[in-house]
Every structure is written in structure tokens, then in C-alpha cells.
Amino acid sequence: EAEWEYACRAGGEGKLSAEDVKKVAWVQENSDEATHPMGEKSANAWGLYDMLGNAGEWAKGYDGDWVLKGGSFKEPAAKVDSAWRAKQTPAWHDPNKPKSVWWLADGPFAGFRVVCEE
């Protein structure tokens, strides 16, 4: 989680204003209630796209549990920042019977980032 937050801030320390968040993130006010293709908003100072908003990203939390980081298209811009986090709830799972083969059928706001070391 700490590494994810550091990469999201691109070495900076400040919280972005809601207007600045809308420039780099798909959030409640500008997303039309859906995710968007990666890279349509501005990158952060390190060239990383969509660290905030769009789809939240899984990270290992400070307490060892997995958390969703960065907010999503469902969150208002004023709430989205590098410290935003959410723990998984039963509401994210498929409510249908029989269950879907998809783990988070009701969690289209959740995703992950693949990181490769050279």
C-alpha cells in the first residue's frame, strides 16, 4: 500500500484539488458511470496513467489485508486521492444463484496493475 501511494503521488506529498483530480482521473462527475480505456487522462509526474479513479487497484494493505486503492469512477473527485482505500465487502460478490464464474461480478470498479521489473 505504501509503495502504491508513493507511485501514485510520483514522489510528491500534496493532495490534489477536486478540479485537478478531474484532469487525471475518471470520477463520478466525469465518467458517465463507467470505466474508460487507460491513458485518456493526463499521466502523473512519473508517466503513470490512471493511478486515481477509473478502476481502483488492489494493493496489500498496511494490515496485511488486500485493499482497493485510488478510488474509482463511482467516487466523487473530492474524495479521490492517494490515501483513498476500501476493503472488499460482500456486496461486491455475485448475488445470483447459481453464482457467476466471475469473482467480483458486482465489482466492475475494481482492477489491478501489472508491474514488471527489468
Image (cartoon, rainbow, N blue to C red):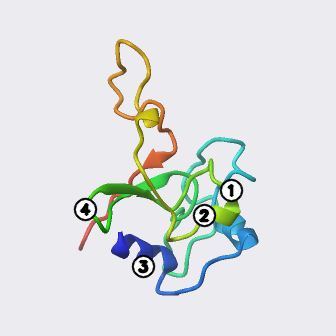
Front-lying residue, 102 or 89: 89
| Residue depicted at 59% across the width and 84% down the height | 14
- Sequence order check: which comes first, mark 3 or mark 4? 3
Looking at the rendered structure, the kind of residue marked 3 is Tyr
Q: Nearer the viewer, mark 2 or mark 4?
A: 4
Query: Closer to the observer: label 3 or label 4?
Result: 4
Residue 64 image label: 4
Q: CA gap, disc 3 to disc 2?
A: 15 Å
The N terminus lies in which quarter of the figure? bottom left
Q: Give me the residue at 53% from left, 66% from top.
A: 49
Relative vertical location of residue 38 with respect to residue 15 in this rendering, above or below: above
Residue marked by disc 3: 6
Q: Secondary structure at mark 1?
A: loop
Q: CA distance from mark 3 to mark 1?
A: 22 Å
SS class of the residue under badge 2? loop
Q: Secondary structure at mark 3?
A: helix
63 w.r.t. 38: above or below: below
Please report whichever mark, 3 or 2, sits nearer to the chain's N-terminal start. Answer: 3
**Real-space CA distance between mark 3 and mark 4, rounded to the nearest whole angstrom:** 18 Å
- Residue placed under numbered mark 2 in the picture: 80
Q: Position of residue 79 (x, y in %)?
A: 63, 63
- Mark 3 vs 1, N-terminal side: 3
Q: CA distance from mark 1 to mark 2?
A: 7 Å
Residue at 44% x, 36% y: name it.
Answer: 92
| Alpha carbon separation for disc pair 2 and 4 | 22 Å
Horizontally, residue 61 falls left or right of residue 44, namely left
Query: Which amino acid, mark 1?
Result: Pro
